[in-house]
Amino acid sequence: MPPAGLKGTSAIVQIGSDVTETAANTFTSQKIDLQLNPLDQEVFVILAVNLDLAAPDLLPATTTNTNFSISSTQRTTVGSLTDSNVIAHKRSQIQDNGITAVFDEHIAGETPAASLDYVYIVATNDFFLNITGTNNASAKTGISRVYGYRARASASVYAALVNSELLSA
């Protein structure tokens, strides 16, 4: 059921997309166009997100990591869930001291508890995939699948959503 002030206009759709660093350890952002119609005050209601991230390189005596996020507005860093425009975030890290290596993975924002009506409402025309690695020998890739539906917002709800999204950048 759509949140108050919204009327669903499509069935649930899945949007699969990916982003690869332009070079190893280089922040890269990929715009995903939702092709929403602002004249009809159309928004995209995100129900769930799945993230898949290439593991960091295992290099002797080196800590390597990869960071990946989905954001509602363009960013200059991957960010984290403390940033209001970050919808989901995943980080993988390998710590190698030259003798042993430890792999650590942090996933936040993937498929939420079933009691939530939605994860995020995108009111502007697109969202962004953001990735960067640290100390890796090769460029890393992040893959996402976003589940959601299109909806039409009332004029006041649409204005509030757009303002909130743009101010969160």
Image: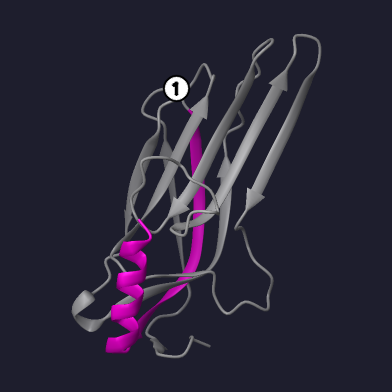
Q: Who's the residue at 61% across and 21% down the image?
A: 57
Residue displayed at 43% across by 54% down:
71
Q: Residue at x 49, y 61 (%)?
A: 146
Query: Was residue 158 drawn as part of the magenta stretch in this picture?
Result: yes
Magenta-drawn segment:
140-169
Amino acid bearing label 1? Ala
**Horizontal and vertical percent for residue 137?**
52, 16
In the image: residue 30, left or right of residue 59: left
Kindly indicate the quadrant of the structure image that contains residue 165.
bottom left
- Badge 1: residue crowd in 10 Å (few <14, some 14–19, many ≥20): some
Rendered residue at 60%/58% (across/down):
109
Q: Is residue 80 left or right of residue 92?
A: left
Image coordinates of residue 132 in percent, x first then y, are: 47, 33
Snapshot quadrant of residue 117:
bottom right
Is 53 covered by the magenta stretch? Answer: no
Query: How far across and down, in percent of the image, does residue 169 sit?
Result: 35, 56
Q: Taking 98 as reference, is 109 above or below it?
A: below
Residue receiving disc 1: 24
Relative vertical location of residue 139 with respect to residue 104 in this rendering, above or below:
above
Asked which secondary structure carries label 1, the reply is loop
